[in-house]
Every structure is written in C-alpha cells, then in structure tokens.
Amino acid sequence: MAMGARLCCSSILFVLVVLLLAATTMARGGVTSSFWRKSEATEDMPMDADVFAVPPGPNAPQQVHMTFGDKDGTAMTVSWVTMEEAGNSTVMYGRATDKLDMAADGNHTRYKYHNYTSGFIHHCTLTNLERGVKYYYAMGFGRTVRTFWFTAPPKPGPDVPFRLGLIGDLGQTAYSNSTLTHYEATGGDAVLFMGDLSYADKHPLHDNNRWDTWGRFSERSVAYQPWLWVTGNHEIDYAPELGETMPFKPFTHRYPTPHLASGSSEPYWYSVRLASAHIIVLSSYSAFTKYTPQYKWLEAELKRVNRTETPWLILASHSPWYNSNNFHYMEGEPMRVQFEQLAVDARVDLVFSGHVHAYERSFRVSNVKYNITDGRCTPVRDRRAPVYITIGDGGNIEGLANEMTQPQPAYSAFREASFGHAVLDIKNRTHAYYTWYRNDDGAKVAADTMWFTNRYHMPNHDDSATKQ
C-alpha cells in the first residue's frame, strides 16, 4: 500500500508538473528576434546584371514561367515573351527531350503602358498531364528553341506529402537574388507567392522594362515549377497622371491564374487543390465586402472544400490580417473583419500574407466575438483559428520594415525584420513541418521552425504555443 501510495503521488506530481509547464507555455508571450537587418532602401540590380541576361539566339523565348492551368494540376499554363516578332505560340511536350510527342497551341498578347510597348506575351496550356510525371517542354519553333522541364503535381489525397515554397515581396535587388538562391537550395515542389513581383512602379514612369528584367530573373525557378500568384499593391499600376487607369494591366497581361477553373469571375481570387492542400488565394485590392463577387465566391468555395481529401486548408492574401509592425499597421483590418469568421468556422489551418517587409508568425488567435457593445475587441487564443504568417521579406527595393510595435502583442508569437523565405513541408493529413529561413550574409539560417497540426483531424491540439 505504501509503495502504491508513493507511485500514486509521483504520478500526480508528474501530471501537475506537466500541467504547470503547459500553463507556463500558454502564458508565455511571443519573441521579437534580436537579429536585425538594415532598414534603408536598397537598389535594384543594374540592368546589365547577369541574372537579367537575355537568352542567346534570334527571337529567343524569355521570361518563361508556369502556373496551374486548372484546379487540380492536370494542366499547366506556360507563358513566355518574344521580343523581335510574335513567332508561334506552340509548345511541344513529352516525357523525354527527344520525344516531345504532344503539342498545345496558345495565343499571344501585347500591351502599351505610357511610353513602353511590351514584347509578344505568349500563353499556352498543356493538358492531359499524368500525375507525378516529369515532362519536358519546348517553345520558339521556327527561330530559337528553348527546352525546360517540370513535374506534374501528385493526385490530391489526404496523406500526399508536398513541399510548398513561400515567398513574398521579392523585387529584384541583390537581397532578392539571395532569397531566390536560398529557396532553390532548399527545394520545393511549387511556390505560393504572396504578391509584389517586380516593383516596376517604384521606377520613374512605372518603367515596365523592369517587368522584363524580373521575368528573366525569376525564370530559373518559375520555368521549372508552378508559382501561384497573389496580387499585391505593386501590381495595381494605376497611374492616371500617366494616362494609365486600368488597374493590374501589366500583371494581367503577363501572369495568368486558373481562376475560371475555380468558378471565380476575376483572376485575382481563385483556388487550387495541391496534394493534400486546398489553397485559396484572395485579393486585398479588389472589393471584398459582403455581397461582392469575391465575398460570395469565398463563401461558396469554403463549402466546396473536402477536408477528407485535402485536409490542409490554406488562405493567402497580400495584406496581413494580423500585423504588429508600424509599417502597414491595420491595413488588413477591413478584410479581417469581413473574412475572419468564415476562416474560423471553416477551421482554416494557415493564412499567409506579404506586404509588410518583415517576418511574423502569430499564435492561433481570433477576434470574432466583438459585437460593438460587448467590448470584446482583443484577440484571444483560439484553437479553431488559423496561424497567421507574414512573409513580405523577399528583398525588395523598399527595404525592411523594422518598426515593431511595443510591447509585442499577445497574438504575436515570433517576429523579425530580416529578408528570407519559408517552406511548408506537409507530411500527411495531421502534421506539417514549417521553416522560415533568414538570409544571413550569404547563408540561409532556419530562424523559425514549427510543427503544425491539422485543424480538421486534430482540432483540439494546441501547436501554436510550442516553438521548436
């Protein structure tokens, strides 16, 4: 009996210690990293930088990039530019470089922006792709042929592993080059890009030549795997003083999205099903209040999500809903007010954003109880809620945002003003391993890592309090 009593007391003591540690962890505030990069603006790489080199050969295809051509990854849309003449918009593709036995015909477009006229911008959708198969593809027939390759995404399923790269606000500075180099070394199967591509609008007259340099710079990755595009404020390119009153003109001519496949009326919000994830892209700079097309589409899209087949539910928008940086502080609040209840009710796992040129990860929090009269306007820990992650730190011309609000809000788990990128490594239906890599003097450093548990299969597990 005495032995049993001692064991019972030991067990109780162990449980109490565990509960105490858990309570301490839950009560612990977030971390503001002591690692700080310079905040001043940076220069874009010079126009003659090697990463902007025009490929050799007459009328050679350049700025090659690809994205989903449908909702489920059995089609890929390939885009490229020819400068001297239109040529043709045909792509040959197949399983070997010497056996390009399938063909797809596309089309081309051009646009003028103030004193700039674009090259011939081609778009061609490759269909009937087999899951997980490596394909080679070529274009430029009749002049200079260039060949690339990609691997078609796997069939969606609950335990299909996938590595998703996460990059935002990239631009084309030396820091941008480091970010892209580090992502290439990390390796991923696709990229979810959080908006703000070229920053051409930061140059006099919105110099659209900087769209061309960015396209050549990013080709080394996006010609070989699909990037999913979120539109940022630097894609708007609205400049009535230049006679340019059509928002998103350069972006929509250059970067198609699979919006029609997901029932969207505009290319700025859409969804795809990628391995075990259902990814929903939203537009911070299109109307989103109740009864607008975007709001109604999101309501309907969330009802179409099948969590037994694609358990990981991810949202992406450019402007963050939770942000403790003085730069762009509260700019995402209108969209949060409209969409947060939908996200919590749907048990969204993660919400990614850019815009703020720093990195931040939240705890699982929500702010949906406020009804004007009850005073409950402070975010609270909520296991039903997503984790919010801001990755606006690609390396752009505007520099870093390092004016963090003080004290660090209770909803903020980790924040740092550095350039970098992240990878979400989905393992199965219940677990995903996440890493944010800091650019550190030419090296990449895993500065923030987390195991995330799925809100559908493990809804009551608290992963937001544990920093690995």
Image (tube, rainbow, N blue to C red):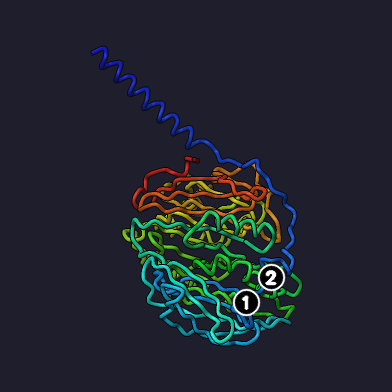
Depth order, front residue of 468/461 = 468
Q: Looking at the picture, how far across and down is residue 392, in whole percent? A: 61, 57
The residue located at (32%, 19%) in the rendering is 9
Q: Looking at the picture, how far across and down is residue 338, in whole percent? A: 50, 62
When the figure is inspected, residue 3 is found, relative to residue 259, above or below; the finding is above
Depth order, front residue of 381/440 = 440
Q: Are marks 1 and 2 in contact (CB under 8 Å)?
A: yes
Residue highlighted by disc 2? 200
Instruction: Give me the disc on residue 250.
Output: 1
- Splitting the image into 4 quarters, where does residue 153 fall? bottom left
Instruction: Give me the disc on residue 458.
Output: none
**Quarter of the image containing the N terminus?**
top left
Q: Quick one: which residue is furthest to the right in this view?
A: 204
- Splitting the image into 4 quarters, where does residue 178 fall? bottom right
Amino acid on which the number 1 mark rests in the picture: Pro
Q: Is residue 200 visible?
A: yes
- Labels in figure, total: 2
Q: Quick one: which residue is furthest to the front in this view?
A: 98
| Mark 1 to mark 2 CA distance (whole Å) | 10 Å
Amino acid on which the number 2 mark rests in the picture: Ala
Depth order, front residue of 384/399 = 399
When the figure is inspected, residue 190 is found, relative to residue 137, above or below; the finding is above
Mark 2 surroundings within 10 Å by alpha-carbon count, few (fewer than 14), some (14 through 19), many (20 or more): many
Depth order, front residue of 186/336 = 186
Q: Looking at the picture, how far across and down is residue 354, in whole percent? A: 58, 59
The residue located at (70%, 56%) in the rendering is 399
Q: Looking at the picture, how far across and down is residue 105, in whole percent? A: 47, 85
Q: Is residue 262 visible?
A: no
